[in-house]
Image: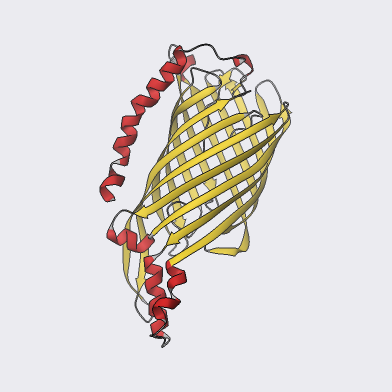
């Protein structure tokens, strides 16, 4: 498993020429229908799609995302029978993600969207597998957007979203802790059977959010996106308790076609902050997360885009108050029907 996860960056690097080849092939194909009305071509700028910072455009759109990544140096405390910490396990966790999103526009002012995602994670070494185990996560999204203001080079939409996830996990270390606690309490016969529910566990989280999204185009070669949303949610490990949550982020989109002799690619830098991580593929504790991203995508066609989005994320571990880093690469493909 360790060698397989280490091979992920090399595999993704090998995929890069294929992505570029597909982009160039698309560039050479027939002209797109109705490209003058492409929703991401706004204010004279071709905006680049992103998973981290959603755009505000009212459009009928399909997007698929395939992601691979690694969480680095996750630390888990080890306690003795008296509850005192005697050691600390650390290790890396590999994870992957598959996501599909579809949005349908009702005219120029309203849109509804649905989404589905699935992911998996596992420790990449014996200590990491013991500390973090393995898990699978499934999620869905239902939401809508309404245009509030649209001007020549800026617009704002209002959004409402319902997002949920279910996490299934195998936790060897938690199982050992539960067995230990049963033995301390004097139950030596049923210690193992009583801890089975801890070894195999599941949890749900739910987000109910409302917010705003915006786009601004100061020039044909650069554009800015932003979003902010707030509402209620819960952790996988404490699904019965509802707390306030907030997400916000910004993105800068640069179209190289305008700057570098019609090169059909664009760059996008992103920043996203979550007070409570929604789809945490790396741990089941559910802390806050801060993410920085950089993407390079094909921009030769106004309705179609494909490319890579890379991100670095810092996630909080409520179990010990520490942070760990996660890196991820996503292959994005998006088509705007209108």
Identify which residue is drawn at 37% across, 77% down: 84
Identify which residue is drawn at 38% across, 20% down: 21
- Residue 91 in the image: state x and y as whole percent: 31, 57
Q: Where 282 sits versus 219, above or below? A: below
The answer to whether residue 294 of the structure is visible from this angle is yes
* Residue 174 placement, left or right of 270: left
* Outermost residue, left side: 3
Position of the C terminus by quadrant: top right
* Outermost residue, bottom side: 186
- Residue 97 in the image: state x and y as whole percent: 45, 44
- Residue 227 in the image: state x and y as whole percent: 61, 38
Q: How many marks?
A: 0
* Residue 226 placement, left or right of 94: right
Q: Where 112 sits versus 254, above or below? A: below
> What is the image's colouring?
secondary structure
- Residue 193: image quadrant is bottom left
Q: Where 323 sits versus 59, above or below? A: below
- Residue 12 in the image: state x and y as whole percent: 34, 35
- Residue 152: image quadrant is top right
The answer to whether residue 236 of the structure is visible from this angle is no
Work out whether residue 1 or residue 148 is closer to the camera in this orientation and state it.
Answer: 1
* Residue 134 placement, left or right of 210: left
Work out whether residue 156 or residue 146 is closer to the camera in this orientation and state it.
Answer: 146
Identify which residue is drawn at 40% across, 71% down: 175
């Amino acid at each position: 498993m360790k060698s397989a996860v280490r091979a992920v960056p090399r595999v993704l690097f090998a995929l890069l020429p294929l992505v570029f080849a597909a982009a160039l092939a698309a560039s050479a194909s027939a002209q797109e229908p109705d490209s003058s009305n492409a929703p991401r071509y706004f204010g004279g700028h071709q905006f680049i799609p992103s998973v981290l910072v959603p755009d505000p455009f009212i459009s009928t759109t399909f997007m698929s995302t395939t992601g691979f990544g690694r969480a680095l140096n996750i630390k888990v405390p080890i306690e003795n029978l008296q509850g005192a910490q005697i050691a600390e396990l650390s290790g890396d966790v590999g994870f992957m993600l598959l996501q599909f999103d579809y949005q349908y526009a009702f005219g120029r002012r309203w849109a509804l969207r649905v989404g589905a995602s699935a992911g998996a994670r596992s420790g990449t070494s014996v200590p990491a597998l013991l500390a973090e185990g393995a898990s699978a996560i499934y999620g869905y999204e239902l939401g809508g957007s309404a245009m509030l203001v649209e001007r020549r080079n800026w617009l704002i939409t209002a959004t409402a979203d319902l997002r949920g996830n279910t996490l299934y996990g195998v936790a060897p270390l938690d199982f050992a802790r539960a067995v230990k606690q049963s033995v301390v309490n004097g139950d030596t016969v049923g210690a193992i059977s009583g801890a089975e529910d801890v070894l195999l566990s599941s949890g749900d989280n739910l987000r109910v959010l409302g917010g705003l999204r915006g786009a601004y185009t100061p020039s044909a070669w650069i554009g800015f996106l932003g979003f902010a949303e707030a509402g209620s949610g819960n952790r996988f490990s404490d699904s019965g308790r509802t707390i306030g949550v907030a997400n916000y982020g910004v993105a800068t989109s640069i179209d190289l076609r305008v700057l570098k002799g019609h090169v059909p690619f664009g760059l996008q830098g992103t920043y996203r902050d979550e007070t409570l991580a929604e789809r945490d593929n790396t741990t089941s504790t559910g802390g806050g997360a801060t993410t920085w991203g950089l993407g390079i995508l094909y921009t030769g066609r106004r309705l179609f885009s494909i490319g890579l989005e890379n991100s670095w994320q810092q996630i909080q571990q409520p179990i010990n108050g520490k942070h760990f880093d996660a890196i991820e690469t996503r292959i994005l493909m998006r088509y705007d029907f209108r």
